[in-house]
Amino acid sequence: MEQLNHSSLLNKLENLESQISLLEKKIKEFVKQIELLKAENTRLNQDINLLKEENKKLQSFYKEYLHLQSKTGVVKQKIKKLIEKISEI
């Protein structure tokens, strides 16, 4: 009976060691995945920062475009009035 108990304990211990080994392997895999995710997160944050910079530039260009468009409208009106005055002569 004692030997049966000893064998049973030994089997349980071997099973436990096997499970621990499996868990250690899985933990290593998870650590690798976490490192990959951290690296990807860093790249994505860099991309976000670049996109924010580009967005600021585009907003600035758009404001300049609107300003120039407004000036163009004023210039067109002045030219139209000038042509009308010339036509009256």
Image (spheres, helix red, strand yellow):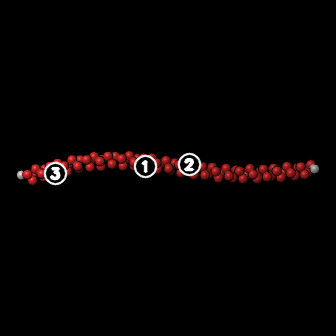
Residue 11 place in picture, x, y as percent: 83, 52
Residue under numbered circle 2: 38
- Identify the secondary structure beneath mark 3: helix
Query: Mark 3, mark 2: which one is toward the viewer?
Result: 3
* Amino acid bearing label 1: Leu
Residue at 64% x, 50% y is 30
Residue at 77% x, 50% y is 17
Q: Callout 3: few (<14), some (14-19), or many (20+) C-alpha neighbours within 10 Å?
A: few
Query: Mark 3, mark 1: which one is toward the viewer?
Result: 3
Residue under numbered circle 1: 51
Query: Mark 1, mark 2: which one is toward the viewer?
Result: 1
Residue under numbered circle 3: 80
In three-dimensional space, the C-alpha distance between marks 3 and 2, rounded to whole angstroms, equals 62 Å
Numbered-mark total? 3
Residue at 78% x, 50% y is 16
Q: Callout 1: few (<14), some (14-19), or many (20+) C-alpha neighbours within 10 Å?
A: few
Residue 68 place in picture, x, y as percent: 26, 48
- Identify the secondary structure beneath mark 1: helix
* Amino acid bearing label 3: Lys
Residue 82 place in picture, x, y as percent: 13, 50
- Identify the secondary structure beneath mark 2: helix
Residue at 91% x, 51% y is 3
* Amino acid bearing label 2: Lys
Residue 70 place in picture, x, y as percent: 25, 47
Q: Callout 2: few (<14), some (14-19), or many (20+) C-alpha neighbours within 10 Å?
A: few
**Nearer the N terminus, badge 3 or badge 2?**
2
In three-dimensional space, the C-alpha distance between marks 3 and 1, rounded to whole angstroms, equals 42 Å
